[in-house]
Image (cartoon, rainbow, N blue to C red):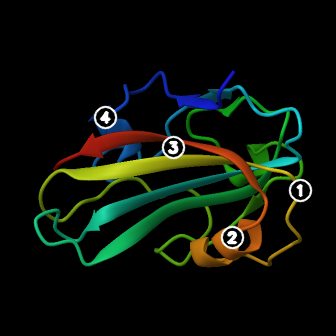
Amino acid sequence: MALSLTSPAFEANGNIPRRHTCDGDDISPPLTWDGVPEAAKALVLIVDDPDAPDPAAPKMTWVHWVLYNLPADSRGLAEGVLSGDLPAGTREGINDWRRTGYGGPCPPIGRHRYFHKLYALDAELPDLKKPSKQDVEYAMKDHVLEQVELIGTYQR
């Protein structure tokens, strides 16, 4: 079975509900995954927006959430999960608001795409001390067994 990632809050390529954005409660959507490879030792979740600031002329990828060392036997995250409620061993990276935790869609213009990317790794990563997305991607570079993405969209 291939690695899969879904959310009961929105369909693939569908609209992310307002409650999961800066215009609503700004809480993370519920996520579920399945098909984690047997050899996996840890998971990484990165949520980012490659359409910033304007989908018609993107200039950067805005990082919304970075989690690493999620347990390989975990199967998802509850809606609105907070730091203290993350699965044991999970570590957090820094988003582009310069803080840990989830930061919901808040596009200044146009309909943006939000990529929820899940990676199965063959090793746990060392403590990277609140890393950036780039730090996590560098650390996991040679350890990715499988990856999957779920895209949601939002326009204000």
Above or below for 135 versus 46 = below
Measuring from the top left, give residue 23's x and y in whole percent: 27, 49
Dots 2 and 3: beta carbons under 8 Å?
A: no
Q: Identify residue type, mark 1.
A: Ala
Mark 1 or mark 4, which is nearer to you? 1
Q: Identify residue type, mark 3.
A: Ser
Mark 1 or mark 2, which is nearer to you? 1
Residue at image mark 2: 136
- Horizontal placement of 135 versus 133: left or right? right
Mark 3 or mark 4, which is nearer to you? 4
Res 123 label: 1
The secondary element bearing badge 3 is classed as loop
Q: Earlier in the sequence, mark 3 or mark 1?
A: 3
Res 28 label: 3
Residue under the point 69% across and 21% down: 1
Spatial separation of the CA atoms under disc 1 and disc 4: 31 Å
Measuring from the top left, give residue 149's x and y in whole percent: 50, 42
Measuring from the top left, give residue 33's x and y in whole percent: 65, 29
Residue under the point 39% across and 69% down: 62
